[in-house]
Image (cartoon, rainbow, N blue to C red):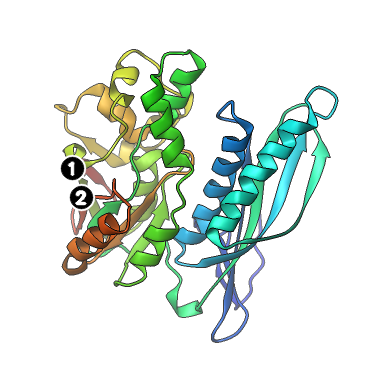
């Protein structure tokens, strides 16, 4: 598909960025994204919260500030009570208020399958845009949320997940990346992305694909919801995990000593996951400490960027 050329387009379809960025002036660029999906939890209020948190994350990953949102609604009006939609919209609006985002409109259609999400517009200085590429040798990798929500959500469908794990997954999915994003703007950052459907290793691969660097990830340092590996061992794994693994396995050198359930967690597709930040080593510890102090409790240094092997990830 031929792409339109525009000198003011900072980030568009040409790369797998988290959001589009268009320069309006030498001092201002707008950041645009949208995301919507079917329910992944039974509670409509929580679903609204998760959907909005997930959509806002793309703007935070670019280093930008979200300002306005527009609802995207597909709703089965003939088979579902309107009170469900009211709760979804209430959950979404509460998260927008928490983020300082103003709801300015939206669009709804009748659909046999319920879907909800948000179109978001944010702003940033053109020179401060963060991309998902640009990692430098010696950088440390910080992950700000635990993995495993895809596995937990799959287990919920089979009524196999504990309430503790469900609560942990919902808490993670409804936590804005706002604090982590604000803190990372206080230090030099080489690259950033949010971890969503491609899983940790899938999004990490995007950061080094066709680049002159590689990564080493310490599997023991990666935060994840405690029950996720047990559930994975029982076979409660989302289909997206297998697709992620198949698509990116050619770029990954996985230590054979890493348990298979933990490998599944590393490829697990996330909803409203954390930020994966590549930051110079001299700033990493201070940034991590600031995150912990400000309540980003699960943030962890999970690896580093190295000059070799180029375009590959070593998981040890």
Residue occupying the point 79% across, 32% down: 82
Residue 154 in the image: x percent, y percent?
Answer: 47, 22
Point out the residue furthest to the right here: 78
Q: Is residue 35 visible?
A: no
Foreground: 45 or 131? 45
- Residue 191 image-quadrant placement: bottom left
Q: Which residue is mark 1?
A: 218
**Looking at the image, residue 186 lies above or below residue 33:** below
Q: Which residue is mark 2?
A: 303
Residue occupying the point 30% across, 35% down: 224
Tell me, for residue 250, which label it has, or none. none
Residue 207 in the image: x percent, y percent?
Answer: 36, 54
Q: Earlier in the sequence, mark 2 or mark 1?
A: 1
> Badge 1, how many Cα within 10 Å: few under 14, some, many 20+?
some
Residue 72 in the image: x percent, y percent?
Answer: 72, 46
Q: Is residue 227 left or right of residue 309?
A: right
- Residue 198 image-quadrant placement: top left
Residue 276 in the image: x percent, y percent?
Answer: 35, 52
Residue occupying the point 21% across, 59% down: 289
Q: Quadrant of the C terminus?
A: top left
Q: Could you tell me if the residues under marks 2 and 1 are in contact, i.e. CB atoms within 8 Å?
A: yes
Q: Is residue 262 visible?
A: yes
Foreground: 133 or 175? 175
Q: Quadrant of the N terminus?
A: bottom right
Foreground: 7 or 197? 197
SS for dot 2: strand
């Amino acid at each position: 598909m031929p792409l339109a050329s525009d000198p003011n387009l900072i980030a568009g379809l040409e790369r797998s960025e988290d959001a589009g960025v268009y320069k309006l002036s030498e001092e201002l660029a707008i950041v645009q994204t949208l995301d919507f999906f079917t329910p992944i939890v039974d509670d409509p209020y929580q679903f609204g919260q998760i959907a909005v948190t997930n959509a806002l994350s793309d703007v935070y990953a670019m280093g930008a500030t979200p300002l306005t949102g527009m609802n995207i609604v597909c709703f089965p009006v003939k088979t579902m009570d309107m009170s469900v939609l009211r709760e979804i919209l209430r959950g979404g609006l509460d998260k927008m208020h928490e983020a300082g985002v103003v709801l300015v409109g939206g669009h709804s259609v009748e659909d046999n399958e319920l879907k909800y999400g948000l179109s978001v517009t944010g702003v940033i200085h053109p020179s401060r845009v963060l991309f998902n590429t640009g990692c430098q040798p010696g950088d440390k990798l910080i992950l700000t949320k635990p993995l495993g929500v895809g596995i937990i959500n799959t287990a919920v469908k089979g009524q196999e997940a504990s309430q503790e794990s469900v609560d942990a997954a919902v808490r993670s999915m409804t936590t804005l990346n706002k604090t982590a994003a604000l803190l990372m703007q206080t230090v030099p950052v080489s690259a950033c992305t949010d971890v969503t459907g491609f899983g940790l290793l899938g999004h990490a691969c995007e950061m080094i694909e066709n680049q002159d660097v590689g990564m080493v990830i310490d599997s023991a340092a990666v935060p994840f919801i405690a029950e996720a590996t047990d559930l994975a061992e029982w076979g409660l794994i989302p289909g997206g995990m297998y697709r992620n693994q198949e698509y990116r396995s050619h770029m990954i050198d996985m230590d054979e000593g890493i348990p298979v359930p933990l490998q599944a967690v590393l490829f697990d597709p996330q909803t409203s996951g954390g930020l994966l930040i590549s930051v110079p080593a001299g700033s990493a510890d201070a940034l991590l400490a600031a995150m912990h102090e400000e309540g980003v409790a699960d943030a962890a240094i999970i690896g580093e960027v190295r000059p070799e092997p180029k375009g590959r990830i070593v998981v040890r």
